[in-house]
């Protein structure tokens, strides 16, 4: 959070004084019953949902800078441009380095390649970049020349590698540029002989926790700063695939990266208006890395597995019920991979990757957003086996792609009868839906399955539109809905915005929580809403009663933080004027004189953040002085306010 300046502190104090002095006649009243605790809620209810969409993994979170590094795309040279004689370049698949990724390239002396990266290669001035390649000499004494070049072709850094042998070996080099370049390319060429190359790779030395071959540090930092309670991965529709052959299979994403099978990303050709024919999954970011990332940022892992159904928007292919056993076994093996002892089959694989300790898996998703009887039939099969063998694991089931309608009602009826643990609801809609949905869960069955509001985002235009924007209007609508989720925290166990990341030059879907280019990353107003809620959680609801004037547009929730002893009040003012509210922290015997206020607001509802102005719409932190449990406060127009007070009842 940005610290408040003296000028902003005066402004905050002025709002407080104005509400007390000159707006009394128009005050609404809000009673926060601090001595009457409500219900226990999940302190970790606010999380993140990651899917490899919008270049979220390859070209995004996974810090590899070379596209098609192992020549495994159907067009083996996609992403590469040949230099020199084209007849001196050959794609081969004999005497391979990897049986899983069998293709490699043979370069004769005087030939070379240039890799375009993922919409270019971002190079930071002064950063060290680690180059590696699996290579062998075919004839002569080859020397590999390596160069980073700018968009205009000028050289940024260059080096060379010798010492080729007759058998495959890993050769390495480092490069450092004195200038910054957003759209660089990597050039490799061979002189003095013929060489075979595979797994051509370039990573920044500085990754998250400086792990070699790791994750892009600035992108992970956004997640760490949010402090999410959980992380759902790896999707999303990529779990399903266009067909079952193209589905996400977690077992192919662990172990050495050269042994992870490259497949087409489901978002490669989904939108004809945003085609991405070069979108494939290398799985350098695989299930081990997902679990490790969750551990790094303090989030509970929530993996989602295919349930024997391809995407129902595509082929809708089904695995017959009597052939579902391998899918269920994958789920059992995943639990063992995450939690099993080091002497178990899959626990040993986890330990071999450097993590003998359990990852502490407690939840598992069965399918993504499937619907109708065909899903229920398959969910039952999973539930019967998993609950018998692992009753400690909570299962997340699907309520379909929409927050209402026949398919939604059918799912809930059946899942309630099956005593499902957690039901995943999805909603992408206009801001009005979110404002109107603040009481959606008030009347849900308190004894029924818990709710995971697993995918949601306000759409400024319409769902799937390329004209959607991450503006303040959408963020505040989401915040208003989130107050309703929090008030009903005994029903809504978890919630996560979607999608998480998007590359400005490679997105398929918008809006998105965090935007990146090859050098920068930027949180949206929606991100700051999520961060304010996740950074200010509670352990228990506190009853609130709002008596608002007819023209007021106020949305409220309150919780108590057992760790700090604070009461946390969240208020969205969706109106165009300051909302003067008389706050009554009823039952409070003592209240600290200083309280902390975070305010998210801007001059216009259409305001967005950008790489040029990344903090345009971001929270401001202030300290205010309080003399009584009853005081007046003016909530700014079009704003989210989080107020933290230490209260003794």
Image (cartoon, rainbow, N blue to C red):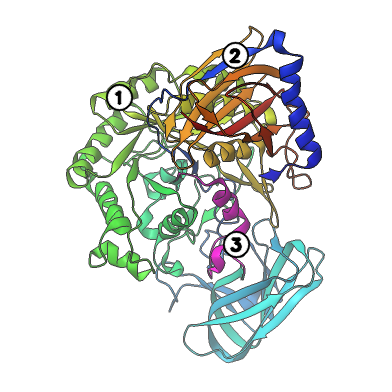
Image coordinates of residue 520 in percent, x first then y, are 70, 54
Direction left: furthest residue = 388
Image coordinates of residue 525 in percent, x first then y, are 66, 36
Q: What stretch is highlighted in magenta?
A: 206-230
Foreground disc of the pair 3, 1:
1
**Residue that label 2 marks:** 29
**Residue that label 3 marks:** 67
Left or right, 216 with respect to 473, comes to left
Label whose residue precedes the other's in the sequence (2 or 3): 2
Left or right, 321 with respect to 157, comes to left
- The residue depicted at 79 percent of the width and 34 percent of the height is 10
Image coordinates of residue 219 in percent, x first then y, are 60, 53
Q: Is residue 47 magenta?
A: no
Tag 1: Cα neighbours inside 10 Å, few (<14), some, or many (≥20)?
some
In what element is the residue under mark 1?
loop
In what element is the residue under mark 3?
loop
Q: Where on the picture, by quarter, is residue 195?
A: bottom right
Q: How many marks?
A: 3
User: Which of 580 and 403 lies nearest the eye of the viewer?
Assistant: 580
- Alpha carbons under labels 1 and 2: distance apart: 33 Å
Q: In which quarter of the image is the N terminus?
A: top right
Foreground disc of the pair 2, 3:
2
User: Which of 479 and 126 lies nearest the eye of the viewer?
Assistant: 479
- Alpha carbons under labels 3 and 1: distance apart: 47 Å
Relative to 622, is 180 above or below?
A: below
Label whose residue precedes the other's in the sequence (1 or 2): 2
**Residue that label 1 marks:** 448
- The residue depicted at 33 percent of the width and 63 percent of the height is 357
- The residue depicted at 24 percent of the width and 24 percent of the height is 417
């Amino acid at each position: 959070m940005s610290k408040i300046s003296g000028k902003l502190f005066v402004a905050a104090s002025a709002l407080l004084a104005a509400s007390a002095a000159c707006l009394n006649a128009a005050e609404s009243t809000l009673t926060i019953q601090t001595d009457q605790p409500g219900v226990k809620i999940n302190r970790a209810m606010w999380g993140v949902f990651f899917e490899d969409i919008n270049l979220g993994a390859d070209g995004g979170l996974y810090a590899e800078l070379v596209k098609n590094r192992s020549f495994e795309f159907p067009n083996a040279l996609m992403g590469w441009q040949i230099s020199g004689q084209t007849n001196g370049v050959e794609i081969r698949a004999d005497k391979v380095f990897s049986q899983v990724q069998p293709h490699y390239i043979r370069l004769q002396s005087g030939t070379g390649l240039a890799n375009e990266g993922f919409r270019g290669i971002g190079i930071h001035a002064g950063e060290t970049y680690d180059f590696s390649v699996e290579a062998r000499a075919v004839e002569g004494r080859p020397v590999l020349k390596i160069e980073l070049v700018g968009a205009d072709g000028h050289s940024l850094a260059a080096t060379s590698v010798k010492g080729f042998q007759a058998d495959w070996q890993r050769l390495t080099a480092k490069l450092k540029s004195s200038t910054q370049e957003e759209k660089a390319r990597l050039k490799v060429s061979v002189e003095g002989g013929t060489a075979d190359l595979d797994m051509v790779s370039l990573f920044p030395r500085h990754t998250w926790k400086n792990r070699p071959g790791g994750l892009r540090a600035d992108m992970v930092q956004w997640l760490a700063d949010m402090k999410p309670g959980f992380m759902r991965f790896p999707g999303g529709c990529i779990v399903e695939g266009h067909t079952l052959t193209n589905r996400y299979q977690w077992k192919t994403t662990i172990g050495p990266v050269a042994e992870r099978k490259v497949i087409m990303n489901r978002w490669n050709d989904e939108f004809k208006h945003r085609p991405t024919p070069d979108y494939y999954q290398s799985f350098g970011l695989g299930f081990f890395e997902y679990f490790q990332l969750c551990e790094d940022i303090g989030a509970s892992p929530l993996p989602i597995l295919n349930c024997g159904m391809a995407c129902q928007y595509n082929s809708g292919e089904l695995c017959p019920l009597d052939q579902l056993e391998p899918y269920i076994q994958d789920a059992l093996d995943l639990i063992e991979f995450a939690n099993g002892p080091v002497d178990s089959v899959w626990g040993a694989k986890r330990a071999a990757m450097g993590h003998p300790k359990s990852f502490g898996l407690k939840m598992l998703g069965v399918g993504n957003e499937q619907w109708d009887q065909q899903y229920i039939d398959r969910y039952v099969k999973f539930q019967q086996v998993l609950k018998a063998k692992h009753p400690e694991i909570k299962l997340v089931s699907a309520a379909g792609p929409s927050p209402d309608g026949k398919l939604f009602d059918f799912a809930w009826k059946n899942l309630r009868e099956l005593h499902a643990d957690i039901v995943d609801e999805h909603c992408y809609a206009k801001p009005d839906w979110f404002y109107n949905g603040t009481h959606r869960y008030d009347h849900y069955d308190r004894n029924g399955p818990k709710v995971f509001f697993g995918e949601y985002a306000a759409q400024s235009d319409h769902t799937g539109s390329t004209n959607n924007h991450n503006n303040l209007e959408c963020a505040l609508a989401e915040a208003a809905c989130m107050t309703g989720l929090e008030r009903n925290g005994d029903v809504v166990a978890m919630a996560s915005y979607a999608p998480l990341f998007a590359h400005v030059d490679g997105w398929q879907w918008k809006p998105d929580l965090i935007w990146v280019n090859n050098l920068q990353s930027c949180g949206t107003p929606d991100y700051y809403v999520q961060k304010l809620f996740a950074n200010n959680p509670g352990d228990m609801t506190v009853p609130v009663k709002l008596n608002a004037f007819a023209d007021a547009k106020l949305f409220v929730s309150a919780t108590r933080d057992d760790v700090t002893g604070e009461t946390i009040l969240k208020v969205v003012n969706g109106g165009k004027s300051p909302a003067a509210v008389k706050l009554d922290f009823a039952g409070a015997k003592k209240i600290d004189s200083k309280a902390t206020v975070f305010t998210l607001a801007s001059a216009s509802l259409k305001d967005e953040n950008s790489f040029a102005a990344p903090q345009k719409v971001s929270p401001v932190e202030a300290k205010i002085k309080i003399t009584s449990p009853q005081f007046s406060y003016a909530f700014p127009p079009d704003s989210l306010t989080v107020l933290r007070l230490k209260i003794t009842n």
